[in-house]
Amino acid sequence: MKEKFRQSMSWLHTWSGLILGWLIFVIFFTGTLSYFRHEITHWMQPETHESVVRDAAALDRAVDFLVKNAPDDAAGWLIALPDERMKTIEASWRKVRIDPKYGIRPEITQNFLDASTGENTNARKTHGGEFLYRFHIELYGMDKTLGRWIIGIATMAMFIAIITGIILHKRIFKDFFTFRGKKGVRSWMDAHIFTAVLALPYHVMITYSGLLLLMMILLPWNTEEFMREYNEMRAKMLEQPAEVISPDFEQYPPVSIVPLIADAEKRLGEKIGKIYISNPGQRNMLATFVPVRSDKITYTDRSRNADANVNYSLRNGRFYGEMRTEPISKAYSVFNALSTLHVARFADTFMRWLFFISGVMGTVMTATGLIIWVQKKAKAANKPFGRKLVEVLNIGGITGLAIATAAYFWANRLVPAYSADRMSWEVGVFFTVWVLTFIHPVIRDRKQAWIDQLWVCAGMFALIPVINAFTSPMNLFNAFSAGNMVVAGFDLTALVTGVLLAVTAVFVSGKKEVK
Amino acid sequence: MLAGLITLALTFTGFTLIALGMEKHHAQIMDKPFNTALKPVYMLSGWVILLIAAVPCVMQYKISIGLTAWFGCMSLSGSVLVLMLTYTPRKVFAGAAGAVPFAAALFLVNILL
């Protein structure tokens, strides 16, 4: 009985892990990079790299910029203050568009202003880190709901693989620190297990919270009442479109926000991160000051990441009071805690790196799992076509994705900065390169294909600091001295990734072929 | 940041002590033969240090985020230990022993600043 149970768990682990394993790898890989999506976006806009020094007075110029440039029908403005992740002042406006399919959609136009002068940097248009982030929750080029369904199913498979993996691994504590190198499949197995066990709390948290974040889609019946109300509201909005009252900044000029920020920080005892401005140019022009982050994971408003904010009239600077989010139910605070952990908006630089490293461990865990499967099962099955197929999927899925990501960063600098359709070019390069990495192992010997792709990948990542030095005012060295740790960190991480991939390539070349 | 480094250092020491309580890893780290009588001492002190390691992070980040940071630190320092046991097992002891004064020094810096 007991053996039978283990066998069935083993079967479940293998197949739940395998069938969607490549997808799970893609989710882990792009999701892990998403911890740094703002940093990636900043790197991908070299026009903003020189914005390092922060000057409070520049924030008033951000308001002036919005007064001059925001369209009359903008429903609201946002000014995001520079911090350790974003070196520029973001000055954006939001229009409300009614989409017949998705309902009320905000249409956001972002502008990045220099943090010392408040001048528009005219940064190139790019999806930046947002592309990788979107890819990990809804894939690309398909209906969003369908994409989220696919991701949700893969997440469920991941969750099953984790639970069955725990049951299968009898010697969790005995083998806690075990890694035996240079032993073929045994080494892959050890690597799979130690990355799984040592970051197990993370893996369980990230997978389960991922499911929770998709629950409205995966369990649609629960939300019928909510959907009914939403549809009624939408029907009303479609019936009676909001009246646009043109702003009049002559009559209602905005006051300086600099003293308001100081007052808001004093009242909240926290640094202000974002300022939302509603009814711009109206009598009731209102500014909402939201602190950077909260120090707990429950009871936070996830979208704004804080449970208190303060409001001022932007017409005369009068304090309008403090808003606290209402206490929420226990169930909702559990959901909040898990989803807050998933997106990790609270994380400072140190915590962000810890999350990133745990994410890398999950990525390695899925990759090694796929490699073990091919080495053990596919070999035993003795079906040449099937084995070649999974090999090709492994190579293109693992090293191929890394190459495509590097190519995305390269395309960011090689596609002309102001060409009209550069955003689709960047994404096009990503997918074209990715497809090529699946074709390459078809025509190449499997071991040689691994080595080729590892070297290409190593070279492309290691050269990122070089390409940055030629296409940005900042390079690895002067970014350090100027204090732009985002660009310096990106370049350095790319360089280290390249070196590690090269070491892996050498290691794989030296290894005997497992036939 | 400093609190995080203290937790990282202490979790490394805690994990090393636990590894010293296991015959297989004891042989990797030390020249001396494994003394079974010391096993509970290693284990207990390792667990205690692991638990203490949570304190700096909890003090810095408050309870919920602090414990999250503690788990993250354990994943990282545990991985470092696993890789060191394979590739440079003889440096583990020096690392774990050095981590304690390192953590203490950081703690002092944290208090004085």
Image (tube, coloured by chain):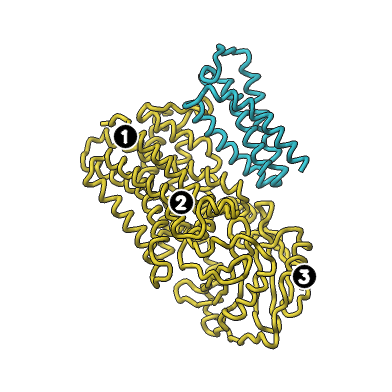
Chain colours: A yellow, B cyan
Type of amino acid at the residue the image marks with label 2: Pro
Q: What element carries label 1?
A: helix
Taking the image as drawn, is residue B27 in sight?
yes
Cα distance in 3D space between marks 3 and 1? 66 Å
Judged left or right of residue A310, residue B47 is left
Q: Which mark is residue A321?
A: 3
Seen from the viewer's position, the closer of residues A102 and A425 is A425
Type of amino acid at the residue the image marks with label 1: Ser
> Which comes before the other along the chain, label 3 or label 2?
3
> Which comes before the other along the chain, label 1 or label 2?
2
Residue at x 69%, y 76% (from the top left corner): A286
Q: Which of the image's four quarters has the N terminus of chain A?
A: top left
Q: On screen, B82 above or below A45? A: above
Type of amino acid at the residue the image marks with label 3: Gly
Q: Which of the image's four quarters has the C terminus of chain A?
A: top left
Crowdedness of circle 1 by 10 Å Cα count: few (<14), some, many (20+)? some
Q: Mark 1 points at which residue?
A: A509
> Which comes before the other along the chain, label 3 or label 1?
3
Q: Mark 2 points at which residue?
A: A465
Q: Residue A268 carries which label?
A: none
